[in-house]
């Protein structure tokens, strides 16, 4: 007999069921607290997010697969992670919305008449072929579930460059002498290197046979050009996170720089003169997604599929939209956006009211129109995708030397 | 293994090493759970890593040591439930019989030195371009400049280094282009060698390898790659061709080794392909085998190109010796 009555009560208390947990690694592109909370509210388990920088994320995904259940990053990161044997194929028969995922992911362009763009178009890495490689021949099994995506360009100060005019701006402006000393590039060899390459080709300084898979000689020429410009004082800095990019602007350091969608909403009064370019050469695009860790089986695998399917319910799509990213399931996403939001972000219409970002702050003011217009217009103009090209190892090492030199010589 | 480990009339080096290790494991001098890593063992034995690698693989197959989640092997059978013991091997005062000792010592300085330098020079190239200076190499190895020069010219002969514009010796970088070219060359010469070798392949050897694959004894594709080279390609009655194949593979196997050291897991698709390849050879369908080999090499090239990309995320190896200076 227990002498302590409270102990007896404890015995009578209902058993505490420990909620199971799904572990997700990824980057701050998709691992938003709002997404996590919304998913937990809908699913019968907890979700842990571990947000890492781009390079750490792909290295850990490849080399420590036992430490996560879901891997969220981009299709261009897949080569490294897939061929390191860290992931398992996703059965599209278990993805309820698979048929509603758009052609941009499945065909590589919004219609069969559109070219796919250079580099790692998601379709080139999407389907798991019978011999275990990933390729674009449609198959039942896929490597990564396509989710958030966007097209990027660069930002420029229109007090320096003037207005774009009907023909649009040019990537050449990113290495233009009008911005000399006030240029910053994003420090990521699968991204920033291509901003620079597009600029070098647009300016006529260089030309690439296949900008999405450069040769060693082409990489050498590009890095030599960047080094020359660096010595002439063109670059003021480089950045790794969107916050750093915004800080450069707020510190009045830049007149042209690599820039991503969410940042344009955080510029405050500078929105009037620091403009998102609509380059006449086309955009640099990226496509995110979620993959299953190799080790998943049974219940855990079931939870993982639930989470993947949740991504396509539209709620995550709405949160992504408010920072300027698109989702693969348009109609589902539309259900969770107000009419004003949908018309601004997806239809390219003038904002009829102030619009809030993912954390509730106003990111779009009434009367503003999204640079580049509607979804269809913007994704029809993809020049190139973020890419981990064959010579990545070589390119990344030269790129890192260049960036170190830029940062050591910051004014 | 032929060049580095067999000297006329002697047991191959890897056998000497595996005998020494076996003796010390069985006597209990090397405790169950001790972590065995190639490099330190190679230093104690005064050899290159290659024969140590083979010796360890052999002991693994015999069940005396087992793989674990970290680098290297653990002493004891896989069932032994003991955590890894990490202590330097030279603390254990290995019991080395006189005969083995002299067997280790008779290998000439030149050869011992050469294997290690070759392994290091091949391995560094995934990390970029390096310069070698003759005097620094001589200092590092503690040998005369004449020996260093011999080592360098041998490396040059085997295509591992070249003379740069300022007449320095340069190694690397191992780019995707180099990798592609080497696989392309393999796809041209290896099927040809296989056809030439057809009548000289020993069926019993092939049966042995087929059994090993079927029983899943080894999960490392390198072992089958080596078996294919040794029992099939090297049987081709054309020394120049065999030499060319060997040299062409040098850098490729160093890439594999670098990737394995980073923890690349077993490639089941590739193992299946070796099974099919050896089945075709074993049933004397040499033309089909040669065709299949081309397809296998194409796939291997693509996979290795993708895998090599991870090296960009890995900091330059701490193991690069100081006579190699990055450019």
Image: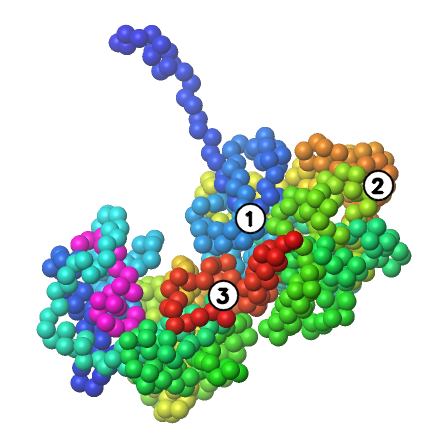
Q: Earlier in the sequence, mark 2 or mark 1?
A: 1
State the mark number for residue A43.
none
Label 2 with label 3: CB-CB less than 8 Å: no
The quarter of the picture where residue A136 lies is bottom right
Residue found at x 44% / y 45%: A67
Residue stretch rendered in magenta on the structure:
B31-51
Does the segment drawn in magenta span residue B203? no
- The chain holding disc 2 is A
Tag 1 residue: A53
Residue A152 seen by the camera? no
Residue found at x 60% / y 53%: A74
State the mark number for residue A368.
2
Query: Number of numbered discs present?
Result: 3
* Mark 1, other Cα within 10 Å: few <14 / some 14–19 / many ≥20: few
- The chain holding disc 1 is A
| Residue most extreme to the front | A411
**Viewer-proximal residue among B42 and A269:** A269
| Residue most extreme to the right | A166
- The chain holding disc 3 is B
Tag 3 residue: B308
The quadrant of the rendering that contains the N terminus of chain A is: top left
Q: Position of residue A396 (x, y in %)?
A: 56, 63
Residue found at x 36% / y 73%: B119
Q: Position of residue A213 (x, y in %)?
A: 63, 68
Q: Are marks 3 and 1 on the same chain?
A: no
Residue A338 seen by the camera? yes
* Mark 2, other Cα within 10 Å: few <14 / some 14–19 / many ≥20: some
The quarter of the picture where residue A217 lies is bottom right
SS label for mark 3? helix
* Mark 3, other Cα within 10 Å: few <14 / some 14–19 / many ≥20: many
Q: How far is mark 2 from mark 1, CA to CA?
A: 32 Å
Q: Are marks 2 and 3 on the same chain?
A: no
């Amino acid at each position: 007999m227990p002498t302590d009555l409270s102990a007896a009560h404890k015995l009578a208390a209902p058993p505490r069921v420990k909620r199971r947990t799904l572990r997700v690694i990824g980057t701050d592109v998709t691992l938003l607290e709002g997404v996590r909370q919304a998913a937990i509210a809908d699913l019968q388990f907890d979700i842990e997010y571990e947000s890492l920088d781009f390079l750490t994320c792909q290295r850990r995904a490849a080399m420590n697969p036992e430490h996560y259940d879901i891997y969220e990053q981009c299709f261009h990161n897949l080569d490294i992670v897939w061929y390191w044997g860290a992931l398992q194929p996703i059965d599209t028969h278990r993805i309820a919305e698979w048929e509603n995922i758009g052609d941009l992911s499945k065909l590589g362009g919004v219609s069969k008449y559109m070219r796919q763009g250079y580099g790692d178009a998601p379709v080139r890495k999407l389907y798991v072929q019978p011999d275990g490689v990933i390729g674009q021949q449609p198959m039942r099994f896929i490597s990564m579930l396509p989710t958030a995506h966007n097209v990027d360009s660069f930002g420029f100060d229109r007090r320096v460059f003037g207005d774009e005019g009907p023909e649009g701006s040019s990537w050449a402006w990113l290495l233009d002498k009008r911005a000399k000393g006030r240029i910053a590039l994003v420090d990521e060899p699968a991204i920033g290197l291509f901003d620079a390459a597009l600029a070098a080709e647009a300016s006529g300084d260089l030309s690439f046979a296949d900008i999405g898979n450069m040769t060693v000689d082409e990489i050498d020429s590009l890095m030599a050009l960047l080094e020359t410009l660096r010595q002439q004082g063109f670059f003021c800095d480089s950045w790794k996170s969107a916050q750093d990019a915004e800080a450069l602007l707020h510190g009045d350091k830049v007149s042209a720089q690599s820039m991503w969608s969410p940042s344009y909403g955080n510029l405050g009064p500078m929105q009037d003169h620091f403009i998102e370019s609509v380059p006449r050469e086309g955009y640099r695009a990226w496509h995110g997604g979620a993959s299953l860790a190799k080790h998943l089986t049974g219940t855990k695998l079931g939870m993982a599929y639930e989470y993947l399917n949740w991504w396509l319910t539209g709620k995550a799509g709405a949160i992504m939209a408010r920072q300027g990213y698109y989702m693969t399931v348009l109609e589902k996403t539309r259900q969770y956006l107000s009419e004003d939001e949908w018309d601004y972000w997806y239809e390219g219409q003038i904002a009829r009211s102030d619009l809030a970002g993912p954390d509730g702050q106003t990111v779009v003011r009434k009367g503003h129109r999204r640079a580049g217009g509607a979804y269809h217009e913007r994704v029809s103009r993809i020049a190139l995708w973020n890419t981990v090209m064959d010579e990545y190892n070589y390119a990344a090492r030269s790129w890192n030397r260049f960036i170190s030199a830029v940062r050591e010589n910051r004014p | 293994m032929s060049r580095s480990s067999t000297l006329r009339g002697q047991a191959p080096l890897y056998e000497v090493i595996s005998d020494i290790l076996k003796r010390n494991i069985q006597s209990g001098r090397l405790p169950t759970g001790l972590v065995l890593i190639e490099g330190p063992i190679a230093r104690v034995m005064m050899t290159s890593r290659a024969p140590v690698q083979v010796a360890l693989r052999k002991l693994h197959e015999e069940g005396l040591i087992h793989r674990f989640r970290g680098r290297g092997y653990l002493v004891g059978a896989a069932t032994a439930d003991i955590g890894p013991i990490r202590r330097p091997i030279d603390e254990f005062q290995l019991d080395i019989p006189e005969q083995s000792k002299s067997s280790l010592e008779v290998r000439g300085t030149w050869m011992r030195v050469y294997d290690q330098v070759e392994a290091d020079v091949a391995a560094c190239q995934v990390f970029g371009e390096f310069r070698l200076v003759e005097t620094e190499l001589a200092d590092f190895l503690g040998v005369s400049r004449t020996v260093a020069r011999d080592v360098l010219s041998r490396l040059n002969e085997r295509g591992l280094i070249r003379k740069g514009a300022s007449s320095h010796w340069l190694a690397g970088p191992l780019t995707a282009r180099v990798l592609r070219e080497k696989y392309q060359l393999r796809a041209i010469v290896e099927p040809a060698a296989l056809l030439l070798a057809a009548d000289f392949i020993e069926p019993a050897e092939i049966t042995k390898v087929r059994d090993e694959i079927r029983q899943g004894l080894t999960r490392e594709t390198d072992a089958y790659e080596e078996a294919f080279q040794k029992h099939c390609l090297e049987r081709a009655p054309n020394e120049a061709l065999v030499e060319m194949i060997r040299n062409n593979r040098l850098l490729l196997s160093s890439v594999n080794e670098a990737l394995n050291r980073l923890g690349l897991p077993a490639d089941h698709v590739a193992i299946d392909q070796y099974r099919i390849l050896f089945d075709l050879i074993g049933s004397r369908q040499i033309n089909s085998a040669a065709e299949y080999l081309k397809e296998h090499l194409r796939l291997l090239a693509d996979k290795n190109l993708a895998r090599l990309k991870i090296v960009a995320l890995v900091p330059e190896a701490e193991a690069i010796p100081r006579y190699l200076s990055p450019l």
